[in-house]
Image (cartoon, rainbow, N blue to C red):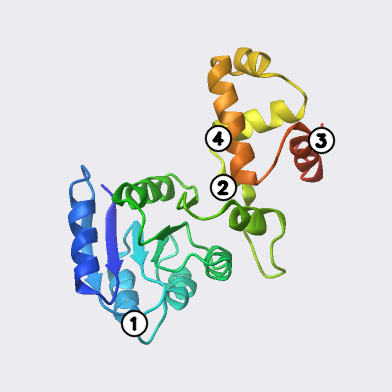
Amino acid sequence: MPTIVLVDDHPMVRGGLRATLGVEPGWTVVGEAADGATGLELIARLHPDVLVVDLQMPGLSGLEVLRQIHVAAPATRVIIFSMHGEDAYVRQALAAGAAGYVLKDADATDLVQAIRVALGGGRYLSPTLTERTITAYLLHPAADQRVDWAEMLTARERQVLVLAAQGFGNTEIGDRLAISPRTAETHRTNLLRKLGLKGQADLARFAHERGLLDP
């Protein structure tokens, strides 16, 4: 049963999040805080599965909470919930280990999906974040950034990536993975979008540069 802590300095935001997440079967909001310092104390005591935290708050910022949480509760997955969608904020959050970045003007289902992905060990970004942002941190990371591109893909998308990079078409990929050609095409389209790639040549080069085609 997933447990969640909310940290945001706006009571109405916390109330809305609590109402949204409370209807998910088995999910429990076990704590709330209006500032980062109090949030860290809660996390150290409760060790929640997920923390949803605002980026900018009085005192300790969401980024500082994110950086310190690895000591306080290393298993807790962190979702940044912010009104700021600029590249710099997203890059910093991902580099610090965020499992997701959701914009506050997104649909409520966006945060729910982010938490589901985080609980499954993946990484999630709001769909409204630009492809330019995705490409920036996946293909041109900063020197201090530690983002695993593979975390952006599902297990099936990673399988399709390798097969597609080897030159297999959708029908062949479908046969090998026991899925329909249309499903294979959908996975290929999704992984290209997530990785900021344009077509077969980009995909093959990406796989080759990361050693995915090595024997």
Closer to the chain start, of discs 3 and 4, is 4
Please give the residue where the numbered disc 3 appears in the rendered image: 214
Judge whether 28 appears above or below 189 on screen: below
Kind of residue indicated by mark 1: Ala
Q: Residues within 10 Å of mark 1 (few under 14, many from 20)?
A: some
Q: Which mark is residue 151?
A: 2
> Cα distance, mark 3 to mark 2?
20 Å
Q: Nearer the viewer, residue 3 or 109?
A: 109
Kind of residue indicated by mark 2: Glu
Closer to the chain start, of discs 3 and 2, is 2
Closer to the chain start, of discs 1 and 4, is 1
Kind of residue indicated by mark 4: Ala
The x and y percentages for residue 132 are 62, 55
Pair 3/2: label in front = 2
Q: Secondary structure at mark 4?
A: helix
> Cα distance, mark 3 to mark 1?
47 Å
The x and y percentages for residue 53 are 36, 68
- Left-right relation of 39 to 159: left
**Residue appearing at x 35%, y 58% in the figure:** 50
> Cα distance, mark 1 to mark 2?
29 Å
Please give the residue where the numbered disc 4 appears in the rendered image: 155
- Confirm or deny contact between disc 4 and disc 2 (CB under 8 A): no
**Residue appearing at x 24%, y 59% in the figure:** 17
- Left-right relation of 138 to 55: right
Q: Secondary structure at mark 3?
A: loop
